[in-house]
Amino acid sequence: MGEDEIIALRRQKLERIRSKGIDPYPARAARTHTTKEAVELLDRSPDGHDVVSVAGRVTAIRQMGRASFMDLRDGSGRIQGYFKQESVGVESYERLLHTVDLGDFVGVQGALFRTKTGEPTIEAESFTMLAKALRPPPEKWHGLQDVEVRYRQRYLDLMANPEVRETFVTRSRIIQQIRRFMDSRGYLEVETPILQSNAGGAAARPFVTYHNALERQQFLRIALELHLKRLVIGGFDKVYEIGRIFRNEGVSTKYNPEFTMLESYEAYADYTVLMEMVEEMISTLAGEVLGSTLTTAGDSEINFSPPWSRIPLRDAIRERSGVDFDAYSDLEELRRAAAETGVPVEPSWGRAKIIDELLTRHVEPHLLQPTFLIDYPVELSPLAKRKTESPHLVERFELFIGGREVANAYSELNDPIDQRERLLEQSRLRAAGDDEAETADEDFLIALEHGMPPAAGLGIGIDRLVMALTGSSSIREVILFPALRERGEA
RNA sequence: GGGCCCGUAGCUCAGCGGUAGAGCUCCGGACUUUUAAUCCGGGAGUCGUGGGUUCGAAUCCCACCGGGCCCUCCA
């Protein structure tokens, strides 16, 4: 039978229900217990034969002639109903068999008991249609495998695959615990604009849109940084935001064009304070969410117990690629050295881009255990503060877990003159054709000129953190509705 | 943007130049403690779309649509 026929049949059943004067979509369900509460009640009083009403989706039907079993699932769990013709009556029993399908929501009222196999069961006295489903649920044996359907119709994925449901519950818990952690340390949660006339704070292409009333081009934010720093200037010493940011780039197992970022800024602190904070936050999180500071990613085990190693970027690149970028004062020589390690160096690349590429290709994939890379070259970090003893480096770290970058932090540059020069340099790069270079945000520079206290700023990619903590290999497994191409008429 | 792979029943898949198949779902029948219920019977298709080669195409070729993986982009 084709899909159209199945739907037509279900519509016929819907009409049959209506013709009996029954509303197949009543406004409310009179339930006394969730399925979980009903099972718990039975555990407490096994011989009580307590009468309960539960409600849920029918996920299995087993007909036995003049008796039938139906599995009922709600958000809390599952329980089965036992329907005997002699208990519910001949007419009701007929209605059950001829109008209830897999996927329908029904309410069941009756006494709790256990079958001889020990299964918690409600012996139905009556049942009510709560919502008739016109389309069938995914097939029960294999669940839902088709990756495209899983993402496009995530509700089917959630119905069919319990581990998917579990991942998103975990994601929610992680974010909840992060909020609790930040709040307990005295941080203030704030919200800053998503629509901006100047998208700065990161090296990425923005999405462009248009504000009709103001007749103005607008950008979707690519970072939270510049507005949060304005708040530090304004006197909020500890602020954070958990929000969606948007980067106009391709999709892959690591990248989704909209993703969730935590950024925090703390006045009078530097980046070393943040390394300890991140270690504490993530290891605590692992303990609370996973019940352990160990988890697996692919075939390797990840240990979140602090302290984590801190490796200067220069050492990490030198060890993994053999290139000591500080040994090359001449850009051409560095270019040649990088090319010899297999990096496809392009003539337009500057020193920063080459170093970054060495990091991405040779170092990043090996950083499975939580690892801080520290002391980045200044060219790679236009918003970070220079190290006093070596001004070509900045006080910055990036955190890698499972071979992916998870966090980025630095002591914030608060010298308005240095900041202006570095942003002007970015503007020159942009003018030279680098459309990912920072834009010079004059409004932000004026804010800095009013004085910003020394401060440390942190960004954590929440999606990648959830990946690390749930052992997911694709970012699409931790985003409920990941970006996909529009479906055509095919 | 480039390379490789995939698209057949509602679902999971087989078939790979000669009459479109299996299991589950679905429909009918038997069955009052089942739970991947079982047993008997029956349906179910634009073989992603369009074009080409061929006596004949799900099968071979081309283009397109959609997806996956890798690369690119993306600190």
Image: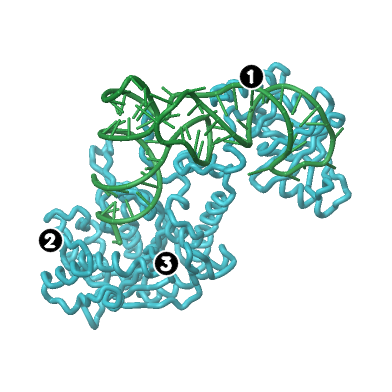
Chain colours: A cyan, B green
- Establish whether labels 2 and 1 are both on one chain: yes
Tell me: residue A327, above or below residue A424: below
Whether labels 2 and 3 belong to a single chain: the reply is yes
Residue on which disc 2 sits: A347
Taking the image as shown, residue A274 lies to the left or right of residue A163, namely left
Closer to the chain start, of discs 2 and 1, is: 1
Q: Amino acid at mark 2?
A: Pro
Q: Quadrant of the C terminus of chain A?
A: top left
Q: Amino acid at mark 1?
A: Gln
Residue A136: percent from left, percent from top: 59, 32
User: What residue does disc 3 label?
Assistant: A401
Q: Position of residue A35 (x, y in %)?
A: 72, 45
The image quarter containing residue A91 is top right
Disc marking residue A470: none
User: From mark 2 to mark 3, how far is it between C-alphas?
Assistant: 32 Å
Q: Is residue A445 shown above or below A123?
A: below
State yes or no: discs 1 and 3 in contact (Cβ < 8 Å): no
Residue at x 83% of width, y 33% of height: A84
Say which residue appears at 81% left-offset and 33% top-offset: A67
Label 2 to label 1, Cα distance in Å? 69 Å
